Image (cartoon, rainbow, N blue to C red):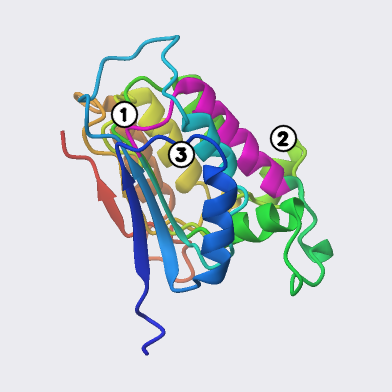
Amino acid sequence: ESEDVFWTLSFTNSTFAGEYAESLVQALYRCPIIQSISFSERDPPIQVPTDNEDESGSTTLAHLAGTLPPWVTCLTFDNVLSNDAFSQLVAVFQTMGRLDLAAEGDVADGPTLSQQSSVAGAAFQFLAISNSPRLRHETFDLFYQLLGSQLRLEKDLGLKHASLPSLVALDLSGNLLGDDSVAALLSTIYDKGTRCSLERLDVSRNSIGRGDAVRRVLVDYVKNNPQSESGSWTSSLTWLGLAS
């Protein structure tokens, strides 16, 4: 079989009670052909943000992200995360960054929780947190910091490693982030010092409006990194979705 072929395991309108998470992780370690996991909620439709809404099982999904096997490189949360769950997901990613990757050890007999978290964080190549306008912008600000370099993370969060060093595609569409929040994300991506590895970013349907703040970030990047100059630094980002 081709090594480029893999399966996606999708859960739609599901509840995650009992020993669901433990059973799923055990199954995934037996099925390395499954390299993509998707959780989505299609009914009821997307609602306007509320402060106390917490969907059943969504916090379980947040903790699950830290225990996935290293070959699961794609992870999607589509309209399933509550505010508490998103905060816990960011905390899980932060924990991944704090772990000493050199101390993972041999996982042949089954990885420990900390070993699972460490290798999982390093493995993610695609992440989607989409269609969730209820999520607080302050938590997104913390999430953006996890895309930065080791130096920036060590200064701001006390981390030893970037939490998502292999992430090349990020989908944050449909979250009503607004112009300022999207601009803050682009500032991290277009900062040479952050060493962000993103190549594709979807921030469509985020109420950017006129996009004045986003435009300033893009103009500054082009002005400060002229492609006509030999040896000029270029961001890894090659595709940006800004559609309304």
Camera-near label (2 vs 3) is: 2
Residue nearest the observer in this picture, 106 or 209: 106
Q: Is residue 109 visible?
A: yes
223 to 204, vertically: above or below: below
Left/right of residue 55 with respect to residue 96 in the rendered view: left
Mark nearer the N terminus (1 vs 3): 1
Q: Amino acid at mark 2?
A: Leu
Q: Which residues are magenta?
A: 78-97
165 to 136, vertically: above or below: below
Q: Residues within 10 Å of mark 3 (few under 14, many from 20)?
A: some
Camera-near label (2 vs 1) is: 1
User: Extreme top residue here?
Assistant: 51
Q: CA distance from mark 2 to mark 1?
A: 25 Å
Which residue is identified by label 3?
187
Left/right of residue 11 with respect to residue 89 in the rendered view: left
Q: Which mark is residue 157?
A: 2
Q: Secondary structure at mark 2?
A: loop
Q: Position of residue 149 (x, y in %)?
A: 63, 50
Which residue is identified by label 1?
175
Q: Amino acid at mark 1?
A: Asn
Identify the residue at image location x=29%, y=24%.
Answer: 176
Residue nearest the observer in this picture, 145 or 122: 122
Q: Amino acid at mark 3?
A: Ser
Q: Residues within 10 Å of mark 1 (few under 14, many from 20)?
A: many
Q: CA distance from mark 1 to mark 3?
A: 18 Å
